[in-house]
Each structure stands twice: as C-alpha cells, then as structure tokens.
Amino acid sequence: MWPCFGIHVLLAVAVTLSPVTAEAQSENDVTGEDVYPPLWDLAPGNLLDFPVKDNKIVISAWNYQDRLGVYKSLLNASAKYFAAFGPQNSGNILWGLPLQHGWQFRTGRLADHSGVTSCGYENGELLCQSVRSWWSCMNYYLAIIPFLGAVEAGLFGQLPYEIEILPPEEQKVDFCYSVKDCWSRMPKLMDEWKTFFEYLLSTEHTAVNSDSFSSFKLDDALGLMWKAHTTSIAYALPRFQDRLKYLSDPEANFGEDWADAVDFIAATHFSTDLLTTNNFQSFLPQRMLVEGDVLPSISDFSPEQNKVLVSLRVLHKANKLTGGLLLKIWKKAMSTEAGRKLGRKLIESLVSSQELELLDLVGIQNYFQVLFEDSQFLENKRFQRGLI
C-alpha cells in the first residue's frame, strides 16, 4: 500500500506544479520581451564583455546585472549543443537558472530584508544583491559554481585572462571566488557541474543533428544537470539557515518548501528550456509573502498560485513526516528513462482531465500525520516488548 499511495500522492501534487496547466506558448513567442529575465538585453553576453583589470576578468557577483551576465555567457557558450531543440536557443536546458534568478529579482527577493541597507531597493541600489538575502545566497551556488565548473570544463575555450569573482562586503567565508578556491573547498560540487559541461562538450559533433542527438542523450544531459543542481542546493541550504530570520514566516516556509520540492522535480528530469520554465514560473508567487498571508486564501494571488503554495507545503511536510520516504519512493519510480517519461505523461494526462482540489491536499497531509503517529505508536510498543 505504501508505494502505491506514495506515487498517487506525488502525482497529485505534481498535477498542481505542472507547467502544462498554463496556456502553451508557441515557438514564435520566443522573441517576446517578457519571456526573458529583466534587463537581459543589458547583461554582458560573453566573458570579454566584463571589465578586465590586472589581466583578470572581473565579475561582481553581488550585482544583478553581472550575475545575469554570467548566466547569459553560459547560455551563449552552450547554445550549439541545443540547436536541434528550438529556435534562438530556446531549447537550452540552462534557461531555468537565469529565469529563476530573474523571478527572484522581479519579486524583490534579492534585496536586503534585514533593514540594515538599501541594497536591492528602488530608492537605493536597485541592482545590488544582498548577502543578507537567503534567495541571493542560495542562488550564488546555482550561478557562480556552475559558471566556474564550466570554465574548468573548457566550455569557454582557452581564456586570455583569469577569472576574478568579487566578494561581498561581509560573510565572505560563505563563498568561494575562483576555480582553484572552489575546488579546494567543495570538490564534489565542482566536479558535478564540471561533469555536466564536459558531457556537453563530448556531444559537440552530434548535438547539431537531431537524429544523432537522441532523446536518451538529452535525458542524460538533464540528469547530469539536475544532479549538480540538487547538490548545489544541498550544499547551500544548511549554510544559509541564518538568512531565513530576515524573512517573514510565510516567506521562509515557502523558501524551504521550494528547495525541498526541487528534489522531486529533478527526479523526473524536468525540462528547463525557455518556454517550459516560463510556463512553470507563472504559478509562483509574484511578490514576497508577508505576515498575514494565510494559505490557501491570499487574495492577490491567483487560485493556481495559492494551490501551488499549498502543494509545496504539503509535499515538504509529508516528506519530513515520513523521514524522507516519500522522496525515496518517487526517486525509485523515476529511476529509469521509461519511468520518467511515463511519469511526465501521467502528469500531463491528469492535468488535462481533472484538477486537484485544496481539500485533497489537506487530506493528504492529515493522512501522513495520522500514519506517522501510528508508526510512532507501534514503534514504542515494540520497544516496550523488547523487540527493538
């Protein structure tokens, strides 16, 4: 019963999270300005567009436009590997990273929420990314680390200059600033991002041909990218727990729920191309959550946005109550390419035929609460009888 029920629950929650509930955009829409992150056109497009000082390319990772330029350089340098999957680089699976970052900027999540500085505010330094922002710090490990992994892998070829990442004004020990520095401090994480980009480089002669660059290989690329992505989050999450204190309780809960949900999304090898990610993000909150925001009745959020937030909360609580068993069940079901494909098709068919009611989500959470309490009761009984 456990595995079957677990899969049913996960598919139900995934229905609410699935991007296909949004109206599909055609390939002709990729030229629309709204599909790109804010200030995308103004961001540096390659590494030599950044300032060069003392024979070093200098990147200010705590400036939104510079960090966006890191992403843009990655997208441009990897474009040829995804040419067969959409016009104008729209099929590139790295789009998920800058689009998430743009959503964070647009919704004010990269600003200083401690009230100490004006970093990230319109009446202060709008393009500033605060080292006190939980979102900004977490994103560092999904921007600078992938970038340095790509540099080490050779994605940018032989560079004429070294790379220098400028540190923040405080909390400098929480970050690394060069390929050498990051390798010495987090070799496993750097290796996983390097492995992903080395895989792209290994497919250079086949990526331009859709016949030879099969869906299986795309699935491999997605798997390697998501593995590195989840490792980045796993490394950063405990490091930045202290930044959550600057957020409202609803926003802090949402941040942790979102970080946990990524593991479930990653297991399906979810495609993070331009259009799919844009559709997906339309269901995320378009402002920061504040005290007084009560789910599922936040008045200025759409019903779908309320539902997504409830889904993320339920998924996080259910996984925590089961000691991570829910995630293990899901990963097991998604452990083959056929399983992942079936999972995505099941989600799409469920979305097209029915909607998940909020009452169902509350019922799922209550079920796991009762199940957990029953399991604790049985464990105590077994202990009393000397069985364990």
Image (tube, grey):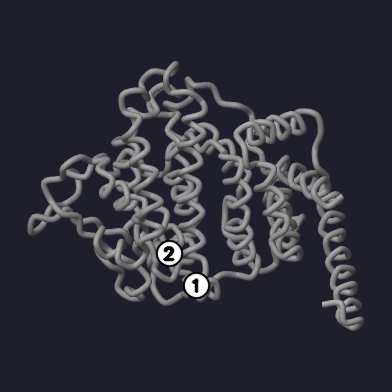
- Tell me which label, 2 or 1, sits earlier in the chain: 2
| Quadrant for the C terminus in the image | bottom right
Horizontal arrangement in the rendering, residue 166 relative to residue 299 (left or right): left
Horizontal arrangement in the rendering, residue 213 relative to residue 324 (left or right): left
Q: Is residue 119 visible?
A: yes
Looking at the picture, does residue 205 appear above or below residue 97? above
Give the residue furthest to the front.
387
Q: Residue at x 92, y 81 (%)?
A: 385
Q: Which residue is mark 2?
A: 137
Within 10 Å of the Cα at label 2, are there few (<14), some (14-19), or many (20+) other Cα atoms? many
Within 10 Å of the Cα at label 1, are there few (<14), some (14-19), or many (20+) other Cα atoms? some
Tag 2–tag 1 contact (CB < 8 Å): yes
Decide which of 380, 305 is in the foreground and name it. Answer: 380
Q: Is residue 86 visible?
A: no
Q: Residue at x 49, y 38 (%)?
A: 222
Decide which of 97, 184 is in the foreground and name it. Answer: 184
**Image location of residue 152, percent across then percent down:** 26, 50
**Disc 1 marks which amino acid?**
Arg
Q: Which residue is mark 1?
A: 243
Looking at the picture, does residue 197 appear above or below residue 213? below
